[in-house]
Amino acid sequence: MAFKALLFDVFGTVVDWRGSIIAEGEIFGQSRGLDMDWAAFADAWRAKYQPAMRRVREGERGWVKLDDLHRENLLELLEEFSITGLTEDEIDHWNRVWHRLDPWPDTVAGLTRLKSKFVLATLSNGNVALLVNMAKRAGLPWDAVLGAEVAGYYKPEREAYLKTAEFLGLTPGECLMVAAHNNDLMAAAGCGLGTAFVCRPGEYGPAQTTDRSAENEYNFVATDFKDLAIQLGC
């Protein structure tokens, strides 16, 4: 079946969350006279991401959007890294760094090429406001902002993938999931979606050990979005 829509994981696949947080941290640290390891801060914040969503997925708590989970995790981090004296507005601004993540160098040009032939939509665990603000700032040309908050389920729950296809009026087989994470693609494949692995070997920094290559058979394996556009005839 020919693919009609491309569904994108966002954090790590479309944008460089780690580099963006480190860059903002360094600016913040200079303004506050803080000498600390902002790479470690970014990694620690991201390490709380899956456990926080798991508690929602497993029914330990009701639905909580990602902005709120990030803020809860941030409050823990500030204590762990002994960062004190922030106002509520400063904490909110810091939390919204996830709205201000920078795209990878190939992202905007690659997406623009892909958009000439396919519907482009997010299939992210990010909430709608986060993804819209990110897209507006970075110039990401989405046709639709979908994913966990709209579906009411966090990936890798099946409903996150199936409902996103349904919202677009498409069958799972008409949708191609694009991600830099093998586990995300395998979950999508299990729901009947096509799969495209895009390599982002620097997502977790120079010491990255996971997702450095495609670990399974996918419909497409690409070095970046421009390469994927070529393979898809865009």
Image (cartoon, grey):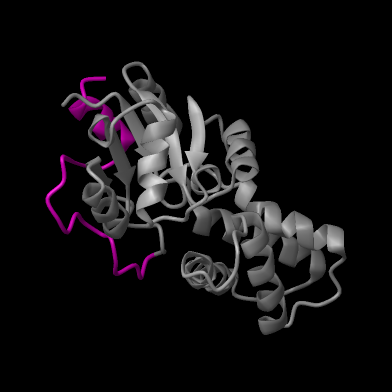
Q: Does the magenta stretch include residue 191?
A: no
User: At 45% across and 30% down in the image, what residue appears?
Assistant: 108
Q: Is residue 192 visible?
A: yes
Query: In this picture, is 110 found above or below 71?
Result: above
Query: In this picture, is 108 found above or below 55?
Result: above
Label total for image: 0
Query: In this picture, is 125 found above or below 46?
Result: above
Quarter of the image containing the C terminus?
A: top left
Quarter of the image containing the N terminus?
A: top left
Pick whichever, 186 or 23, lies toward us: 186
Q: In the image, is 16 to the left or to the right of 201?
A: right
Residue 232, given in percent of the width and then of the height, sits at 21, 26
User: At 63% across and 71% down in the image, what residue appears?
Assistant: 73
Q: Does the magenta stretch include residue 232?
A: yes
Residue 20, given in percent of the width and then of the height, sits at 57, 53
Q: In the image, is 31 to the left or to the right of 202?
A: right
User: At 54% across and 42% down in the image, what residue appears?
Assistant: 150
Give the magenta range: 206-234
Q: Which residue lies furthest to the top in this view?
A: 116
Query: In this picture, is 124 found above or below 51?
Result: above
